[in-house]
Amino acid sequence: MTFTSAALNRIKPSPTLAMTTRTLELKRQGKDVIGLGAGEPDFDTPDFVKDAAIEAIRAGKTKYTNVDGTHELKEAIRAKFKRDNGLDYAVDQISVNVGGKHTLFNALVATVNPGDEVVIPAPYWVSYPDIVQFAGGTPVFVKAGVEQSFKMRPEQLEAAITPKTRWLILNSPSNPTGAAYTEAELKALGEVMKRHPHVWIMADDMYEHIVYDDFRFTTIAQVCPELYERTLTVNGVSKAYSMTGWRIGFAAGAPWLIKAMAKLQSQSTSNPCSIAQAAATAALNGPQDFLEERNAAFQRRRDLVVSMLNQINGVTCPKPEGAFYVYPEVSGLIGKKTPSGLVIENDEMLIGYLLDEFGVAAVHGTAFGLGPAFRVSYATSEEILEDACTRIQKACGDLR
Ligand SMILES: Cc1ncc(COP(=O)(O)O)c(C=O)c1O
């Protein structure tokens, strides 16, 4: 007998984590598999951050903390928002949670009621719709495909908003496409939002620091001050500081919302790990120059992958502004046959073929709500990426 809740039955396991698990399992079996599925940097957590954690343990910072974050970390987050985004927040406007996913989970579960709608541009990060559905809400997708550089247009946003809309989720730079909104594009979306005061904005800025060329990151509360009051600006240390395993995410917004999130957290996880909080404090307060060095490495990898994938007939791979993903569109490959006679009917089959026959693990686009495409995470060495892209070229070249 099993007995699962209706809320649980509304969600599915994360497809990106499932691909990571499958890749690890194949590697354990001794198979030659290159994993391009994981959404985490291959760089190590900086030493000064690790030292701060060790110091915290020695200093006995091993007890419960304030439910939604230590005062020290909240001050570091306030300083970060001021420094990086020109945004002023008071301490009671800051929430610290067990990773960025938890931040988004808390905010949505604390505010969404059955019948509420949440506008999500597609392709989207896999967890948004599931968290909305877990909360009882309805995701409303806005299709932003390769032909519009994976960015939602103002008129599409306008058309998606109804009296039931509660939130708009904006993720820039984006997982899975790497696309990032310019200041002008954010302002244009902001103009629409100004006309709909019942809709709040969740700005997921997780990849803020990972941008290329001369792209200048901005966030909506900064460029549309009129929307500051109803924007929850979400960020974390996972991606920029290579701290995915430490599990610290945070958000800044209206005091009532921060309090609501703390209430939920007080009855679920309680405080995020005290040691991880000390490490995150050090990361935010410490030297930031290594971010630029790492970005230079990411940019070389992006350029390599984009160039190699665009050499394939039937594949269109735009060059993204940020994050460490590319999202090649593959409609030209659908309907073709593998050498063993299998017809590639969709992107999921393409991904299965790449993994089974060529040992390359990526994630199919329909998992992110818009295909046919797949997501490549290029957070690995140029040597490995070159090997992987050569395999993808061969695999696609073998299709007839
Ligand atoms: C767009 C986006 N938001 C939030 C998160 C969550 O990050 P964390 O690992 O801190 O929970 C991720 C992680 O993949 C992400 O890609």
Image (cartoon, rainbow, N blue to C red):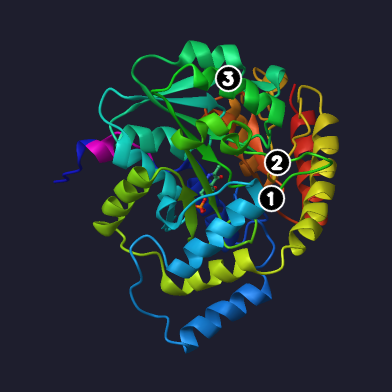
- Vertical relation: 29 (above or below) 327: below
Mark 1 and mark 2: Cα distance apart in space = 8 Å
Q: How many labels were placed on the picture?
A: 3
Image location of residue 146, percent across then percent down: 69, 22
Q: Residues within 10 Å of mark 3 (few under 14, many from 20)?
A: some
Earlier in the chain: of badge 1 and badge 2, it is: 1
**Left or right placement of residue 113 versus residue 373 in this view:** left
Earlier in the chain: of badge 3 and badge 1, it is: 3
Name the amino acid, label 3.
Glu
Note whether residue 249 is visible. yes
- Vertical relation: 256 (above or below) 349: below
Q: Is residue 178 magenta?
A: no
Q: Residue at x 50, y 50 (%)?
A: 89
The label on residue 191 is 3
Earlier in the chain: of badge 2 and badge 3, it is: 3
Q: Residues within 10 Å of mark 2 (few under 14, many from 20)?
A: many
Image location of residue 38, percent across then percent down: 59, 50
The label on residue 217 is 2
